[in-house]
Image: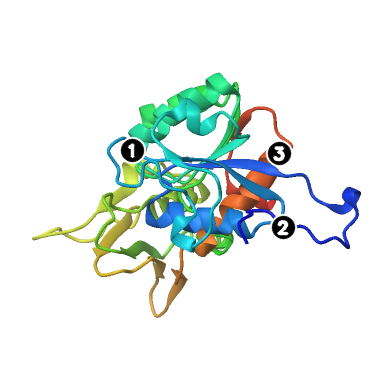
């Protein structure tokens, strides 16, 4: 089979879902390949572009070659070439690269699903400005389970607002370049907002030496890096005589890819605006 989209002859034309033409940034990376495979398996999606950095050994190769298939979509470094046939870009790369991609998406009217983490406040503001012209969904974690966990944390924080110390512990593979993870920071933001606090003012990132007693108004973070851990996150609410732990563990990046495709489908009904996975999943 050499097609990305297969349809059954038993389906009427009216029952076949409309195709979403998708470009993928970082197409030769671990997450990029997972996305290519997910798009290939989705009946309502088609790979329309594949991007990678200039100088990558993957440039010129077929984006699905690693699967033993021919998609007819080569991996390219030129943004306009990679996006010219796409309706939406999925991007799990680096902040600077993502912003460069979004600038071209804005020019071409291409929507974007962004899973990149590590944006500065200024970069987040730049994304919000671009979203005035195109629809953008940004989430530090596109796992459906993780986003349900965010909702659970919001509920727990409100119920455990006094008498409980809050610590966020995350673990990822040795190749991850930012810490704490974007998911851990989002967890902190959700909890802080539920408590009426500003995470910038109450976050504590690691401890060493004589630190003094713990300030009960703080939210602590600890980051672990090693091996091939896909992503583990635990939020600890530690009270007197009891503790509550809310944990999510990822065993495969496939959950991120499937969440990204749900976001692609959600954006099909949007002309412009900045959205997150709570919008996609109806968790507002």
Check the image and report above or below for 147 versus 105: below
Tell me how far mark 2 sits from mark 1, CA to CA: 30 Å
Tell me how far mark 2 sits from mark 3, CA to CA: 21 Å
Spot occupied by residue 6 in the image (x, y as percentages of width and height): 72, 57
The reply to whether callout 3 and callout 1 are in contact (CB within 8 Å) is no
Q: Is residue 171 left or right of residue 266?
A: left
Q: Is disc 2 surrounded by few (<14), some (14 to 19) or many (20+) residues within 10 Å?
A: some
Which of discs 2 and 1 lies nearer the camera? The answer is: 2
Quadrant of the drawing holding the N terminus:
bottom right
Identify residue for label 3. Answer: 268
The reply to whether callout 2 and callout 1 are in contact (CB within 8 Å) is no
- Disc number for residue 6: 2
Check the image and report above or below for 59 versus 156: above
Q: Secondary structure at mark 3?
A: loop
Residue appearing at x 44%, y 24% in the figure: 126
Spot occupied by residue 191 in the image (x, y as percentages of width and height): 47, 53
Check the image and report above or below for 33 versus 114: below
Spot occupied by residue 153 in the image (x, y as percentages of width and height): 52, 60
In this view of the protein, can residue 249 be seen by the observer? yes
Q: Earlier in the sequence, mark 2 or mark 1?
A: 2
Which of discs 3 and 1 lies nearer the camera? The answer is: 1
Q: Is residue 145 left or right of residue 188?
A: right
Spot occupied by residue 182 in the image (x, y as percentages of width and height): 39, 50
Front residue (pair 206, 224):
224
In this view of the protein, can residue 154 be seen by the observer? no
Identify residue for label 1. Answer: 53
Q: Is disc 1 surrounded by few (<14), some (14 to 19) or many (20+) residues within 10 Å?
A: some
Tell me how far mark 3 sits from mark 1, CA to CA: 28 Å
């Amino acid at each position: 089979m050499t097609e990305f989209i297969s349809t059954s002859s038993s389906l009427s034309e009216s029952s076949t879902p409309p195709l979403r033409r998708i470009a993928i940034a970082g197409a030769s990376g671990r997450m990029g390949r997972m996305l290519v495979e997910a798009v290939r398996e989705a009946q309502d999606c088609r790979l329309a572009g594949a991007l990678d950095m200039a100088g990558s050994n993957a440039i010129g190769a077929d984006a699905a070659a690693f699967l033993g298939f021919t998609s007819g979509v080569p991996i390219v470094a030129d943004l306009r070439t990679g996006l010219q046939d796409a309706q939406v870009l999925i991007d799990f790369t680096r902040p600077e690269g993502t912003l460069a991609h979004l600038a071209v998406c804005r020019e071409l009217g291409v929507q974007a699903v962004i899973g990149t983490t590590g944006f500065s406040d200024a970069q987040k503001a730049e994304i919000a400005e671009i979203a005035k012209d195109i629809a953008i969904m940004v989430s530090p974690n596109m796992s459906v389970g993780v986003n349900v966990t965010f909702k659970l944390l919001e509920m727990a924080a409100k119920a455990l607002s006094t008498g409980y110390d809050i610590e966020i512990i995350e673990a990822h593979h040795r190749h991850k370049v930012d810490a704490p993870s974007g998911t851990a920071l989002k967890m902190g933001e959700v909890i802080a907002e539920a408590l009426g606090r500003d995470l910038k003012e109450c976050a504590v990132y690691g401890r060493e030496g004589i630190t003094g007693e713990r300030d009960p108004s703080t939210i602590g973070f600890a980051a672990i890096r090693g091996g091939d851990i896909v992503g583990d996150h635990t939020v600890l609410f530690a009270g007197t005589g009891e503790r509550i732990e809310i944990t999510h563990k990822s065993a495969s990046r496939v959950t991120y890819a499937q969440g990204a495709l749900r976001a692609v489908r959600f954006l099909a009904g949007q002309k412009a605006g900045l959205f997150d996975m709570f919008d996609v999943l109806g968790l507002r």
